[in-house]
Amino acid sequence: MFKNEDDFKKIVDRLNIDDKPSAAHRESLHKQMLSVFDKSGEESKTESRPLWRTIMKSPITKLAAAAVIIIAVLVGIHLIGGSSSIAFADVLEQIRTFRPYSCTVTSQYEGKSAITRQLMKLTNLRRREVYTDGYVQIFDLSQDPVKMLAIHPDKMLAIEKTSPDIEPGRDFDLLRYLSIIQDENDLRLTAEELGLQEIDEQTAQGFHVPGENNDWTIWADAQTGLPIRIELIHPKIGQKIIMSDFEFDVEFDESLFAMIAPEGYTVKKVVEPTEQDLIEGLGAVAKFLGGEFPSVSEFRLRPLQKVLKEYIEQNNLSPSQDEMHSLGEKLSPAMKYFARINSNKDFFKLSYVGGGVRLGDANTAILWYTPQGTPNYHIVYGDLSVREVAPDNLPTESKEANTRVALDIKLPKPMFVGTPQDYKVPNLEKPLGRDRPPFLAPVGTKNVALGKPVFSTDEDPFIGEIEMITDGDKEAADGSFVELGPFKQHVTIDLEAEYNIYAIVIWHYHKQAWVFFDVAVQVGDEPDFITNVKTLFNNDIDNSLGQGVGKHKHYTETSEGKLIDAKGVQARYVRLHSNGSTGSDTNYYIEVEVYGKAIK
Amino acid sequence: MACRAIICLVMVGAMAKPVKQTDADDIMVRAHREAEALSQLYELYYERIFRFCAHRLFSKETAEDVTSTIFLEVASRIRNFGGQTEQDFRYWLYAIAANQANAYIRKASRRKKLLAEAADSMTAVTSGSTSEPDWPRLYAAILKLKPEHQTIITLRFFENMEYEQIAKILDAKPATLRVTLHRILGKLRRHLETVFEGEL
């Protein structure tokens, strides 16, 4: 017999194996394969994949496809050849100095309908937008606080919005943004000439300015350099904006920009929530939760409601109506502010990392975001102080430590179909009736049991091998489970290092809706589990295992597995007990996953 | 080193012609859309994949069936395959091959059939047994391993691949593979002992 790899290799090399293929099969498969290949080509041609999605997915074809898009989208473009008459700098020069203009702006997110509006810019800070359904927005960013008037002709309603948080004197204008491209000193932002084309009866010079975040195509009058058409693609957020029908140096009637509701309209005044509202709301929630900021992956209403409800239940609280009303009053404007900054993640870049941070902790950040119009971030700390920092100075460690994300638990294919037999098991948990909710754990938490050594009271299983418990195969099919001997047995997983363990997921045998008895899950820091043993789960109601009477419920096997919240306990060894099931005296295991993070 | 890269030859299968690495990469890029390039990859790899299947599945007839499944899957997916080099293709192809072979033997009835075939061959071939296993006996022992472990054995000892290459195919870490293989060989040794004792 062989002793090591080299020995085994020699044995293999000496084998006499008839592994010559047949020429007929080779030839016949070749033909079949080409036929399948041709067919797949035809299918891919008929797929209605949006062209601009292709651009985003394939950087290699990006430039070529951009040119194709322009040709496909624009009506009235004819290639007329010839050499360039203006440079990109000429175009920038034309738009660097503001001149009143109007244009049509079409904005479209991938997979959504396009929205078209007419934009009129009186000054850098005053604009009017008219949508195709008659809805009008007038902005005046020259005032403090900034104001906006929304006119709904269909409802004869005018809403005057005041936004105390928006810094006056800054308006987002694509032309202005384009004009400062060169100032960004970014080598990627180098214009490529696209040649001359006829667009809407004008000779236009094209320029393509690629970028990871903004991909510009500009067609400008070949004589004057004034923009004729601008196309901007945001590959990362899947948005396309087209500006066309430009008119420059327009002599607008100034009354179009007046912040006055039309006669006969109902006027509603709205003051938009501010950062101060957000801070007060955060403080109120933390105070309600016993001085701790809520553990939610995103600061949205539903997750927050769930946390509040669970806190009330777990602590047997009976908050008075006044208390709840007071909390609601503080939370309502804060949630509106959150809704706003949650609505555009790429713009506001909100990160909430406050889960578990104590109210009053001046050193730990609970959230940060970029308020409108500022390049820097605002960081809110546990003591509710706010500091403005440059993007490079964000507290990354704090983010990683506090951020909780849903564990990515890959579930096996469900095998059991039908109604589970009523085994009359006492203390049996009712089925949830829906998918298990996501389990939140710190960023970077992963299955640390995968491939790790397993020991068992039965080292010679009836079926399978003990290593299969941590081999990553969670299917219930033959060949995927191990059947240990009857009655009380346990398996121990050596994680080979200490980890903070957040969850343990167990699949005993989900091919049948069985209930396993005396399931106990323990962790320890030595393999014999003699000292410093912590029991995380125990449904041994009569102390058969001798580990104490368990209070947890029996549960029915499903393909979701049984998830046990380990609450970050530190341990190296995980031991799982069982004592047969409703289906068999023997003990089955398909897989055990231990989700944890290495201790730094 | 640059010179070495340029003259690096890819020899695939006994019948295949030597192909320069850069040429092979070019074939891969073209194979996304050109039948001719796909045919060239097929010629390069058919025999190797067939042998891989024959080593995993013992029966040549079964190996032909699974080889067909593998290349038909390649043909239907290669237009969307993101790989750009011949090496990318090789790892991808072997990953498909490993999955298809595993899928085949996961069914207990098929496993039994293969085992029976090996047992039949064993009786016919091994009169006067030695202390060293012949192919049917070794196959019977390998077949007792988990399918994923069988793949590792085949890639390492029959395809003569390095740990790093196997790791790419199986999306695993080379160090983990090294440990796993050590354990697999231990099991294989035990299985072989039982096979020699006539327990199939």
Image (cartoon, grey):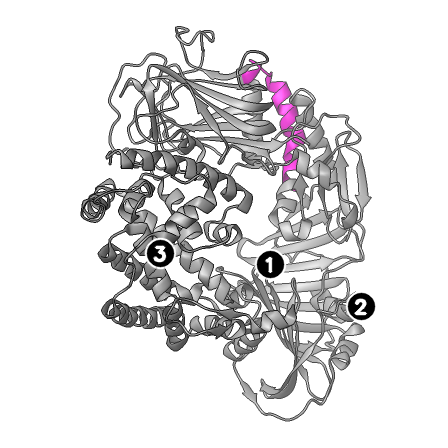
Which residue: 51% across, 39% down?
B179
For marks 3 and 1, give the one nearer the viewer: 3
Tell me the residue that label 1 is attached to.
A236
- Is A217 left, or right, of A503 in this rendering? right
A65, A504: nearer the viewer: A504
Disc ID at residue A183: 2
Q: CA distance from mark 3 to mark 1?
A: 42 Å
Disc ID at residue B52: 3
Q: Main secondary structure of the magenta part?
A: helix
Q: In the rendered structure, which amino acid carries the disc numbered 1?
A: Lys
Which residues make up the magenta segment? A314-337
For marks 3 and 2, give the one nearer the viewer: 3
Chain assignment, label 2: A
Chain assignment, label 1: A
Q: In the rendered structure, which amino acid carries the disc numbered 2?
A: Asp
Percent across and percent down for residue A143 are: 80, 54
Crowd rating for badge 1 (residues with CA inside 10 Å; few <14, some 14–19, many 20+): few
Percent across and percent down for residue A517 are: 36, 16
Residue B55 vertical position relative to residue A188 in the rendered view, above or below? above
Same chain assignment for discs 3 and 1: no
Percent across and percent down for residue A261 are: 67, 55
Percent across and percent down for residue B132 are: 33, 43
Same chain assignment for discs 1 and 2: yes
Mark with earlier residue (1, 2): 2
